[in-house]
Each structure stands twice: as C-alpha cells, then as structure tokens.
Image (tube, rainbow, N blue to C red):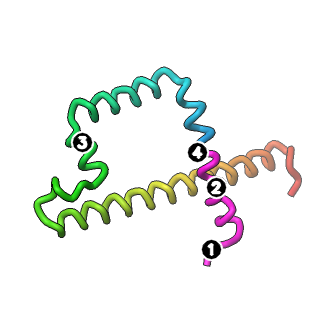
Amino acid sequence: MESPFILELESLIDEIANQVIKRLRSDETYAALLGRRIEIQLQYPFVMHVYEGWETIFSSVEEHRAWLEVKRTLDETEQMERLALYVQGHTDCFAYLRKIGVLKL
C-alpha cells in the first residue's frame, strides 16, 4: 500500500502538469516542436495510427496487444519518473534550505 503522501502527490501531479504545459505553450521552442509534431501527423497519418494503437495496422492480434502493453507500460513508467523527479526536487529543496540555515529541522 502506498503512503498517503505519495497518493496525495499523485493526485496533484496532473494539476501541476497542466500548469507547466500552459506555461510551456508560450515558449517558442516548445511551440515549434509541438507544431512540427502536428505537421508530421497530418502529413503521415500512419504515425498517429500507430500512436493510437489502431489494430488494423498490425499484422496480428498478438502484435496489437503487444503494442498496447508497451504503450501502457511506457505511460506508467513515465508517470512514475515524473513523480519521482517531483519528490526528488522537494527533497533537494529541503536539504538546501537546511544547508543554508533557513530551516532548522
């Protein structure tokens, strides 16, 4: 069972991610990359079909299931990595504040 702290962080991560994305949309480099991705997907619909896991583009049901499993596990591991980075950032912040004498814990 996960700790209440981790469960609370997991519930906040989507809200934080949305705030970050809103901020990034005003960044020229991010906007250019996003635009390029959309351009490629429009030019090559196959790319989006693979990403969405359309079963008709796979040669067998097994390949389709394998793709879905890879995509699911990739999504889950990326979410865990983001959460771990967020927690590590908090840990580093507290350690730094203690080191410079702002926190006396």
Kindly identify which numbered label has been placed on residue 47.
Answer: 3
- Would residue 62 be counted in the magenta stretch? no
Residue behind mark 1: 2
Residue behind mark 2: 87
Q: Earlier in the sequence, mark 2 or mark 4?
A: 4
The residue lying toward the viewer, choosing from 36 and 105, is 36
Q: Circle 3 sits in a helix, a strand or a loop, which is it?
A: helix
Query: The disc labelled 4 sits on which kind of residue?
Result: Ala
Which callout, 2 or 4, points to the residue nearer the camera?
A: 4
Mark 1 Cα within 10 Å, few/some/many (few <14, many 20+)? few
**Image quarter for residue 71?**
bottom left
The residue lying toward the viewer, choosing from 88 and 78, is 78
Residue behind mark 4: 17
Q: CA distance from mark 3 to mark 2?
A: 34 Å
Q: Earlier in the sequence, mark 3 or mark 1?
A: 1
Query: The disc labelled 2 sits on which kind of residue?
Result: Val
The image position of residue 99, as x and y in percent, is 78, 47
